[in-house]
Image (tube, helix red, strand yellow):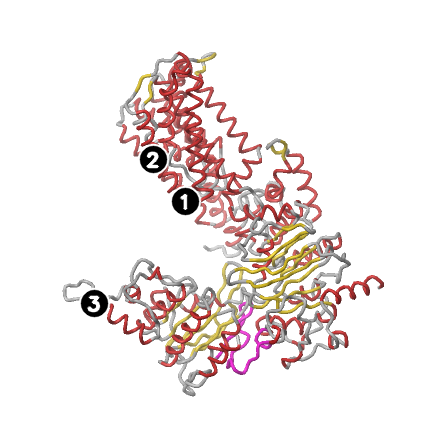
């Protein structure tokens, strides 16, 4: 991490140095709006791109980054707003129009032709011709070789594109953007599947482009990269424009607070959620996961949850929260790690085994991984326990009816009747159906991945109250949430992930908005013990110049381990 | 357009709000209602209409012998289509059914010396085995259903030719009885078809397996996360489909008293898929209509019979079939597109 930063600092074209002062903006977007159905994706967003700058575009899920990019490149027609390109008002009706005007987009998945050569891909549709009208392969290869050489990319231009690594393929896509003389290059999470060395090369190419006066937009959820590469940043949140300014003037915590819509001074907005507060819980963890590593996603993640405890799992986009619970649930292939439930080890990579051991996972993506749209509410609820509802493979309808009836009442699921197709329900009711599905399995560990996202306020409060109730009944709950209130008010303890590692573990008085913010930004761990397993991160985190959270003497003085801390807190709870 | 008071969008994504009707919106929802209704019941209406037409225009249509013949002739398509519907419900498809029929037919002469019962048993086993291969390719290795079963379609036909070769007549009293006998005037083959229909209905409506098949077709990823034995269920679906195809192969062989691996079941996959689709089971999986599939098979049979009765060439009949398939799929897509 530190090394990469050094590289950026050494670079002559470091942040801001090459931008001529007062250069005319290349792209100007004012008050862009766009809605899909009832959902307002952009509510008046501004974006200005200057020639020769790398502009970071950041925001959490649903902030409107992708929509803005697609509006900019003619994929979506905006509902309103002013768009200027090179000073002139424009509206791109189709992606091809934007490309012709000199705006190139490079997506995470490379959209080139894998079976053609690198040179063919670079000049696809614009191949140099011989006088017979055939493709002048010689000239094409020469030019392509020259081009990639200039950009500092080391590939054989006559080789098939598909044989290159993903990073090299993205470099080719960049080369293509250069060859069409793009004035604007948009890179949408180009680094998310690249190896560190490939990232460095990509950055080198991007800096070369900047030097030649191209405006680059860089979208990444790896925050470190923003400071390495970008000159300015625009932050979006919930479709609103939040902040634009020089990258160097922003520290991590401020950036994250812009992204999440909270700043350290705003602490104290208590009672935003329906969560009642802390829970009584047992001593021995029922879920014990340690050393979990998933290739290029997680390393050495540990998580313990006691019966009746709600453990929050925090982290920004791409920090590995969902991956952690999926790895525990056996849904992701793990490189190493151990998960045990009530003392019994789980077989890695087996969802069925995890389920049988009493683990349930409410997935973040309700539509793709949750509901079965054409099945009834009833069948959706009973899905995971069908074998138990049957005798000799034949379903006993009365058993299902009894079970479904119980949960419809208990979770207040609103449907015309139990036979209604689940696709016709509102998001909140669909979520309740899924929660019911998992509760049918009588889990001892419930992994909740963003349980309140995308549902209406009423349902949200009901779900929050339900989580409390479940913990009260002794269920061990892992709560993933992007909303700091939910973590601070709903969880007994919060494990914060950053870049696939446990960044901090906060409990008791440390569990405050400001502490959480610092940890989410990846600034709480002492650099010296980077990579230490969870539990050893109780260092005072005020060193980074962030305001202390006024948590009193207990957090500041001697650092008790997480376990001791929680035990102490529990005693407190017990007496009180 | 004039009526701006009513929010149009409400109807575009609203639920089953098909009765509220006034002004421009009324017409919209009426059309929605129409298409859904046609999709659900169109096959029955078409079948009834075609029967009416035949009663009027076809001489001797209302006649026990004619109806009996129609029922006997629809049996193979019906049985194969029911198996096909099970696979289509998982979001799959099975192109190998015709080849499996041929394989079953090819096996019979090899074992008929040991008696009809054993020969039939071996034929059904051969079918089930083929289904297990297709199912394994799809469920365990992850080959696309269309590719896996296309391979089996070619390989199965080849194997059938290798085992059976030329057309062979079969002289066995058991087989003859199965093919031509009847009880209380109902041919055995029709009885078999009825039993198969009831069994498939039971599988779909009453068993864990049936629910799981539909769930996997509806959302495979969610089914995995819900702990369903996805691989095993898919495998079973393909075995059921191939087994039913083998049943159809045995029945046709028994009826014609001959094993003809070269020609038996040619283009059967197309007829079966047609029957399933016009019966209202979407190719996109997640749903299955057993009664609709039966009606679809009957409708196809009746179209062919009508053409023959009026001396319309076979080629025209095939084109009519094509038009019906495209129309049925269009109705399904049309609804999907408007969502």
Q: In this figure, which residue is indicated by the disc labeled 2?
A: B155
Give whichever of A386, A89 is nearer the camera.
A386
Q: CA distance from mark 3 to mark 1?
A: 40 Å
Give whichever of B201, B7 is nearer the camera.
B201
Crowd rating for badge 2 (residues with CA inside 10 Å; few <14, some 14–19, many 20+): some
Residue A540 in sight here: yes
Q: Report the side of A482 relative to B21 (left or right).
A: right
Say above or below: B5 vs B313: below
In the image, residue A306 lies at what x, y percent?
A: 72, 57
In the image, residue B198 lies at what x, y percent?
A: 52, 26
Q: Report the side of A318 relative to A160 (left or right).
A: right
Q: Nearer the viewer, mark 3 or mark 1?
A: 3
Q: Residue at x 51, y 58 (%)?
A: A37
In the image, residue A64 lies at what x, y percent?
A: 51, 67
Q: In this figure, which residue is indicated by the disc labeled 1?
A: B144
Work out which residue is located at the far bottom of the displayed protein and give it.
A21
Q: Report the side of B200 relative to A179 (left or right).
A: right
Work out which residue is located at the far left of the displayed protein and give it.
A132
To the question of a shared chain for discs 1 and 2, the answer is yes
Q: Chain of mark 3?
A: A
To the question of a shared chain for discs 3 and 1, the answer is no
A182 falls in the magenta region: no
To the question of a shared chain for discs 3 and 2, the answer is no
Q: Secondary structure at mark 3?
A: helix
Q: Chain of mark 1?
A: B
Give whichever of A149, A210 is nearer the camera.
A149
What range is drawn magenta here? A232-256
In the image, residue B107 lies at what x, y percent?
A: 37, 24
């Amino acid at each position: 991490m530190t090394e990469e930063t050094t590289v950026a600092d050494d670079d002559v074209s470091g942040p801001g140095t090459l931008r001529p002062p007062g250069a005319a903006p290349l792209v100007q977007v004012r008050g862009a709006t766009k809605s899909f159905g009832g959902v307002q994706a952009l509510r008046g967003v501004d974006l200005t791109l200057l020639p020769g700058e790398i502009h970071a575009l950041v925001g959490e899920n649903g902030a409107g980054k992708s929509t803005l990019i697609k509006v900019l490149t003619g994929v979506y027609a905006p509902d309103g707003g002013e768009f200027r390109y090179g000073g002139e008002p424009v509206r791109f009706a189709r992606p091809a129009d934007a490309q012709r005007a000199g705006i190139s987009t490079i997506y995470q998945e490379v959209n080139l032709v894998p079976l053609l050569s690198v040179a063919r891909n670079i000049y696809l549709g614009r191949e140099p011709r011989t006088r017979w009208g055939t493709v002048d392969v010689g000239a094409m290869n020469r030019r392509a070789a020259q081009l990639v050489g200039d950009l500092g990319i080391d590939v054989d231009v006559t080789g098939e594109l598909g044989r290159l690594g993903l990073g090299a393929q993205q470099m080719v896509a960049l080369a293509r953007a250069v060859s069409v003389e793009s004035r604007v290059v948009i890179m949408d999470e180009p680094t998310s599947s690249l190896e560190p060395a490939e990232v460095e090369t990509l950055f080198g190419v991007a800096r070369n482009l900047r030097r030649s006066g191209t405006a680059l937009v860089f979208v990444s959820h790896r925050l470190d990269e923003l400071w390495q590469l970008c000159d300015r940043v625009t932050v979006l949140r919930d479709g609103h424009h939040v902040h634009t300014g020089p990258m160097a003037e922003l520290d991590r915590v401020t950036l994250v607070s812009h992204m999440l819509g909270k700043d350290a001074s705003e602490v104290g907005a208590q009672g935003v959620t329906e969560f009642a507060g802390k829970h009584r819980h047992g001593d021995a963890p029922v879920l014990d996961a340690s050393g979990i590593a998933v290739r290029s996603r997680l390393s050495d993640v540990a998580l313990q949850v006691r019966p009746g405890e709600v453990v929050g799992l925090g982290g920004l986009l791409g920090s590995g929260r969902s991956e952690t619970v999926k790895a525990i649930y056996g849904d992701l292939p793990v490189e190493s790690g151990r998960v045990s439930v009530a003392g019994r080890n789980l077989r890695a990579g087996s969802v069925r085994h995890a389920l049988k051991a009493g683990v349930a996972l409410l997935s973040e993506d309700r539509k793709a991984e949750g509901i079965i749209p054409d099945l009834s509410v009833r069948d959706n609820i009973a899905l995971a326990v069908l074998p138990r509802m049957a005798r000799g493979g034949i379903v006993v309808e009365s058993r299902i009816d009894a079970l479904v009836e119980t949960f419809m009442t208990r979770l207040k699921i609103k449907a015309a009747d139990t036979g209604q197709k689940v696709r016709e329900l509102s998001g909140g009711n669909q979520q309740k159906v899924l929660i019911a599905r998992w509760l049918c399995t009588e889990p001892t560990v419930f992994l909740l991945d963003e349980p309140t996202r995308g549902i209406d306020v009423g349902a949200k409060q009901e779900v929050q109250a339900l989580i409390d109730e479940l913990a009260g009944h002794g269920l061990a709950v892992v709560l993933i949430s992007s909303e700091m209130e939910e973590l601070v008010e709903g969880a007994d303890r919060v494990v914060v992930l950053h870049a696939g590692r446990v960044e901090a573990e906060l409990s008791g008085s440390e569990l405050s908005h400001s502490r959480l913010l610092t940890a989410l930004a990846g600034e709480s761990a002492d650099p010296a013990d980077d990579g230490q397993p969870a539990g050893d991160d109780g260092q005072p985190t005020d060193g980074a110049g962030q305001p202390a959270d006024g948590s009193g003497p207990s957090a500041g003085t001697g650092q008790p381990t997480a376990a001791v801390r929680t035990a102490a807190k529990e005693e407190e709870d017990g007496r009180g | 357009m004039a009526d701006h008071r009513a929010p149009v969008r409400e109807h575009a994504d609203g639920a089953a709000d098909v009765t509220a009707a006034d002004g421009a919106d009324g017409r919209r929802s009426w059309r929605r209602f129409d298409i859904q209704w046609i999709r659900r019941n169109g096959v029955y209406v078409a079948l009834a209409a075609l029967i009416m037409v035949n009663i009027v225009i076809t001489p001797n249509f209302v006649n026990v012998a004619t109806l009996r013949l129609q029922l006997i002739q629809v049996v193979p398509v019906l049985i194969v289509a029911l198996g096909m519907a099970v696979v289509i419900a998982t979001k799959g498809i099975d192109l190998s059914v015709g080849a499996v029929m041929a394989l079953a037919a090819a096996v019979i002469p090899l074992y008929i010396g040991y008696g009809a019962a054993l020969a039939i048993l071996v034929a059904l086993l051969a079918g089930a085995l083929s289904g297990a291969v297709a199912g394994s390719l799809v469920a365990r290795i992850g080959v696309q259903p269309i590719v896996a079963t296309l391979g089996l379609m070619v390989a199965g036909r080849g194997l059938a030719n290798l085992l059976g070769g030329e057309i062979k007549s079969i002289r066995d009293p058991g087989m003859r009885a199965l093919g031509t006998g009847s009880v209380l005037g109902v041919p055995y083959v029709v009885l078999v078809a009825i039993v198969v229909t009831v069994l498939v209905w039971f599988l779909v409506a009453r068993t864990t397996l049936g629910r799981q098949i539909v769930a996997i077709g509806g959302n495979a990823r969610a089914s995995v996360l819900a702990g369903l034995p996805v691989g095993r269920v898919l495998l079973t679906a393909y075995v059921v489909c191939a087994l039913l195809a083998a049943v159809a192969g045995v029945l046709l062989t028994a009826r014609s008293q001959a094993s003809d691996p070269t020609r038996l079941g040619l283009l059967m996959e197309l007829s079966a898929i047609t029957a399933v689709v016009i019966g209202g089971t979407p190719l996109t999986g997640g749903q299955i209509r057993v009664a609709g599939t039966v009606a679809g098979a009957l409708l196809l049979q009746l179209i062919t019979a009508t053409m023959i009765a009026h001396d319309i060439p076979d080629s025209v009949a095939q084109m009519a079939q094509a038009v019906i398939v495209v129309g049925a799929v269009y109705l399904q897509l049309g609804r999907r597109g408007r969502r």
